[in-house]
Image: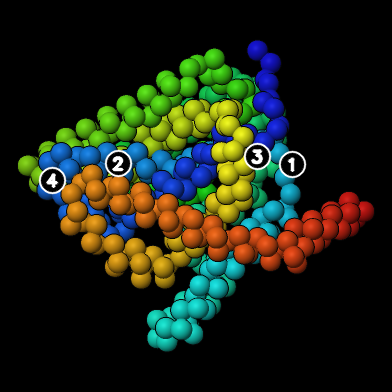
Amino acid sequence: MAPRMTDTKRDRGIDALRILSMLMIIVYHILHHPNLLITRVRFTPGYDFVLFTQLCLMCAVNCYVAISGYVGIASPHRYSRIAELWLTVLCYSAGVTLLYYFYRPGSVSITMLWRSFLPALSREYWFFSSYFVLFLMMPLLNAAINALSRRRLEIILVTLLVFIGAIGSFYFGATNKDSFGVNRGFSALWMIVLYSAGAYIRKYDVFARTKRVRFLLVFFITAAASTALKLLVQYYAIKTRHNVNYYNTLFINYNSLNLWICALSLLLFFRGLKIRPFPGRVIAFLTPMTFSVYLIHDHPLIRTRFFNTSLHFLGRLNTPLMLLSAVGIAVCIYLVCSGIDWIRCFLFRLLKIRKRLDALENRISERLTRT
């Protein structure tokens, strides 16, 4: 079967997944940073459901990277885009740090200040540091994916997902040794694997005739199964006092089998999803601000001052109310951060940042071509 690229028209289903993924990330941060799971009695229904919720949410980062592959394989690669993204990251990394430096004296050290001006190198945002490397590799990855036969590409992807993903994650849990340098999925290497998987799904339109509901079933069944297995391992570890690190890390590394299956299931569900005109316009408006929502709410200072210290009250609520409150807070955070970034987008358009960066890239390309 010859490869078939899907329509290059903007896929609002994929944009909807971007927004959903970012909301999932925020909800996870609300539950994780104050460690609300430990406010539930272990092995009670409340504890089990919060754990299940967290395992559903944790695939969101993988979704975001797989979307990059799904979109990137069919899009022109321009280095001006990563330059614009770098400026956006700098805007929030340095901007928020400077605000704290001047308005909360003593809260920011000189080291923190200069690190905020080097976001890609300092890993102030681990995702951007790893994504920066991935972006530089995209032309090479796209060329390789387009040149390889479908069978060869499938063999490579399965091998990488199994060994670097599933086996590597299990081995890390058992030995605390990172044999493949994947850093629990917090690395450019794992992003390259996910990017390639997303690109493969787009290039060959895999499972195009499968009913969407089946992908949701795979998602929830995988999350439920990993929750049950994690609880069993926890119970065994506590009873035997054996290999405690194993139960702490199992199923929660980004390269864990359950998390990349959940992520790809959501990608398959949302790709090509038909969106009605009004929700489509809302999605189109919010999509450009989505990544900045991450940059604002997960800034190290905001994470420390807000998520780690101000949300402990949620732990005193019953489980359903705690989770509903987390979702409500996440929506508010998303909207507030989007409003802030709308101003940044307006200023970038006013200063013609994208046009200037595109022109600069064109001039450099022309100069390199002549030489």
| Residue at the image position 50 percent from the left and 78 percent from the top | 99
Residue farthest to the left? Answer: 239
Q: Is residue 254 left or right of residue 269?
A: left
| Residue at the image position 55 percent from the left and 60 percent from the top | 339
First in sequence: mark 1 or mark 2?
2
Residue farthest to the top? Answer: 1
CB-based contact (under 8 Å), mark 1 and mark 3: no
First in sequence: mark 2 or mark 3?
2
User: Callout 3, which amino acid?
Assistant: Gly
Residue 76 is marked as: 1
User: Callout 2, which amino acid?
Assistant: Thr
Which tag is nearer the camera, tag 4 or tag 2?
2
Residue 42 is marked as: 4
Residue 72 is marked as: 3
The answer to which of 89 and 337 lies nearer the viewer is 337
In space, the residues marked 1 and 2 are separated at their CA atoms by 37 Å
Quadrant of the drawing holding the C terminus: bottom right
Question: Residue 281: horizontal and vertical position, in percent?
Answer: 62, 42
Q: Identify residue for label 2.
A: 53
